[in-house]
Image: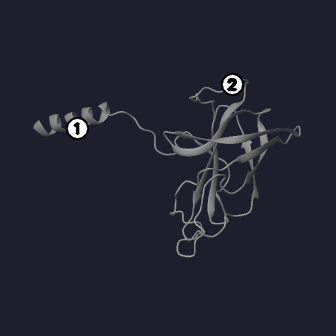
Amino acid sequence: MSCRWAALGVWLVLAALPAVPARGQGLVPVGEPAVQAGIRVRVGYLPWAVSLDPPRPAVEGPHVIHLQVEVEAVRGNPYGLDPDDDVPYLRIPFVLVHEPTGRRQEGVLEPMVSRDGFHYGANVALIGPGPQSLTLEVGPPEGLARHTDPRTERRSWWAAFTLTWRFRYTPGE
């Protein structure tokens, strides 16, 4: 009988702990991560708009998502970043194309932080459900100084490159 009460007590304590989502919980992945120029780019979206501080103009429509992009250094990168470090100071323009209609939207992802950690993101009203094409331009950090003296120098930043993913948006995911 005392073992049952102990087990019940443990269960009650665990049930009372706040639920903290794991990194990426609720995030719908878009394709596979891409590795280029010593960095890894991962894309996903939350199937709803998020609130931001400071507030941004509301994005409205029946197909609003929060586009989320993580940019991290990989082992052996020449920039002095530790593996899995988030890469700061990026400006990431994007183009989203609704493939059935060919209609496109453009914007720039901005740096932000959430329970999932640091990422670049934006609330976006998709044109509609179905196949989508997402293209990102990943340029080097803007305004992040790097050492150039002979004893501590780091290699020059990468040249901007473009990545494209295709995915199917299904409302209610």
Disc 2 element: loop
Give the percent coordinates (x, y) of residue 77: 59, 68
Disc 1 element: helix
Q: Is residue 21 visible?
A: yes
Q: Residue furthest bottom?
A: 150
Give the percent coordinates (x, y) of residue 108: 73, 41
Q: Nearer the viewer, residue 156 or 16?
A: 156
Residue sitting at x 49%, y 46%: 23
Determine contact: label 2, label 1, CB under 8 Å. Answer: no
Image position of 61 with respect to 92: above or below: above
Quarter of the figure with the C terminus: top right
Quarter of the figure with the N terminus: top left
37 displayed left or right of 97: left
Q: Is residue 67 visible?
A: no
Q: Of the residues under marks 2 and 1, which one precedes in the sequence?
A: 1
Residue under label 2: 57
Q: Determine the CA span between mark 2 and mark 1.
A: 46 Å
Q: Residues within 10 Å of mark 1 (few under 14, many from 20)?
A: few
71 displayed left or right of 11: right
Give the percent coordinates (x, y) of residue 101: 88, 37
Residue sitting at x 51%, y 63%: 83
- Look at label 1 and name its amino acid: Val
Residue sitting at x 73%, y 25%: 62
Give the percent coordinates (x, y) of residue 164: 76, 53
123 displayed left or right of 13: right
Q: Nearer the viewer, residue 80 or 144?
A: 144
Q: Residue furthest front?
A: 149
Residue under label 1: 10
